[in-house]
């Protein structure tokens, strides 16, 4: 059957100090431009949320901070906040709301708090969610900075955030759907670690909440999970992409040595790489600790990566 959700659009890694996090990601072998910050006033002051992206051909990793949290990196791009006359107050209020949501996430722990799914039919997905009794904030339009050979271009994106513990928030953070404009085509760099796609996100929940979390994600994704190792539920998306739910007691069996900072919480994501042996050499040469998953995959532990384990998976 055709699905209104296909793959992973992006994960958002929320950090206190963008400068330190950028340095880490570049040591991990990802190419990221300087972060973009909206600015207001004269002299211009960063406002709301700063972010940058590690792009792949079909999705990306977002590195996010709240303005005022840590030093603004020297290579940051300051982008004046502009809107049609009369719309600026609403835009500022929306940005403040997003920043407040992310600040509440950061108070829980530093790590991944955003998971967005790719939707080729976001209006159809919105209707399906409503029919399943899943609250959401409706389909919204926004713009995001995209790196191209000619510089930064603002591209339209439509998105929908699920409501749960509050507007735009579910227990584990911000979860929703996104649909890029067909014209949106960022320049995709050649990452030194060989990464070509974001392929998995792992959510850890309390043992007694695993069945409820499975039901929630069934309603979000419109598909059933399959049960593999004890204490895990996996939702297969398009191609190699998937979302895995894991009970807290089973996490060490999946990612040895890992522990969730808070439950529920996203504890890991995986990227596909062209040559996992070469990626492992890059990580070790950079002085980063390297572990092995239960299936033998390479990962950098969460303690060394600002609260999230990063798995490097050999592309099929």
Image (cartoon, rainbow, N blue to C red):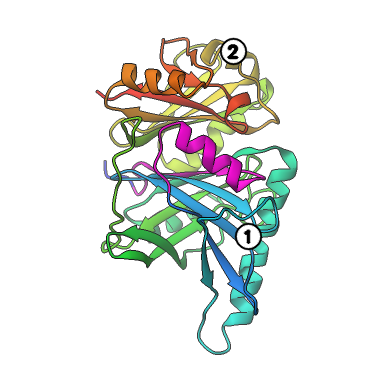
Can you see residue 206? yes
Identify the residue shown where x is 35% and y is 30%. 193
The spot of residue 91 in percent (x, y) is 59, 75
Q: Report whether 267 appears left or right of 219.
A: right
Magenta range: 4-32
Which residue in the rendered view is the most extreme toward the bottom?
A: 85
Residue 288 among magenta residues: no
Which residue in the rendered view is the most extreme toward the right?
A: 107
Give the residue pinned by disc 2: 252
Q: Residue 235 or 259: which is nearer the viewer?
A: 259
Dot 1, crowdedness within 10 Å: few (<14), some or many (≥20)?
some
The disc at residue 98 is 1
- Considering the image in quadrants, where does the C terminus appear? top left
Element type at marker 2?
Answer: helix
Q: Report whether 197 appears left or right of 244.
A: left
The spot of residue 20 in percent (x, y) is 60, 41
Residue 11 among magenta residues: yes
Which residue in the rendered view is the most extreme toward the front?
A: 74
- Considering the image in quadrants, where does the N terminus appear? top left
Identify the residue shown where x is 50% and y is 86%. 84
Distance from disc 2 to disc 1, alpha carbons, whole Å, reads 33 Å
């Amino acid at each position: 059957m055709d699905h209104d959700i296909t793959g992973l659009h992006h994960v958002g890694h929320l950090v206190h100090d963008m400068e330190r996090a950028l340095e880490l990601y570049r040591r991990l072998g990802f190419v990221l431009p300087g972060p973009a910050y909206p600015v207001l006033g004269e002299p211009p002051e960063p406002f709301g949320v700063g972010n940058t992206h590690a792009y792949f051909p079909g999705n990306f990793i977002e590195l996010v901070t709240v303005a005022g949290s840590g030093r603004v990196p020297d290579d940051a791009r300051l982008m004046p906040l502009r809107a049609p006359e009369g719309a600026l107050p609403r835009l500022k209020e929306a940005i403040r709301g997003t920043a407040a949501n992310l600040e509440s996430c950061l108070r829980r722990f530093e790590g991944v708090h955003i998971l967005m799914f790719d939707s080729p039919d976001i209006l159809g997905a919105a209707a399906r969610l409503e029919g399943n009794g899943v609250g959401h904030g409706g389909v919204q339009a926004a713009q995001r900075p995209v790196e191209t050979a000619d510089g930064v271009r603002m591209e339209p994106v439509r998105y929908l955030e699920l409501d749960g513990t509050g507007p735009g928030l579910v227990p584990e953070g911000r979860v929703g759907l996104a649909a890029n404009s067909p014209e949106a085509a960022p320049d995709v760099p050649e990452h030194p670690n060989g990464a070509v796609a974001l392929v998995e996100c792992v959510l850890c929940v309390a043992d007694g909440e695993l069945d409820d979390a499975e039901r929630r994600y069934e309603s979000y994704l419109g598909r059933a999970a399959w049960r593999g190792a004890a204490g895990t539920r996996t939702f297969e998306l398009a191609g190699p992409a998937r979302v895995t739910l894991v009970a807290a007691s089973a996490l060490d069996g999946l990612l040895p040595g890992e522990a969730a900072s808070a439950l529920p919480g996203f504890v890991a994501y995986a990227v596909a790489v062209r040559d996992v042996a070469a990626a492992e050499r890059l990580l070790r040469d950079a002085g980063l600790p390297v572990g092995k998953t239960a299936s033998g995959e390479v990962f950098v532990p969460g303690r060394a990566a600002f609260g999230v384990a990063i798995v490097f998976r050999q592309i099929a």
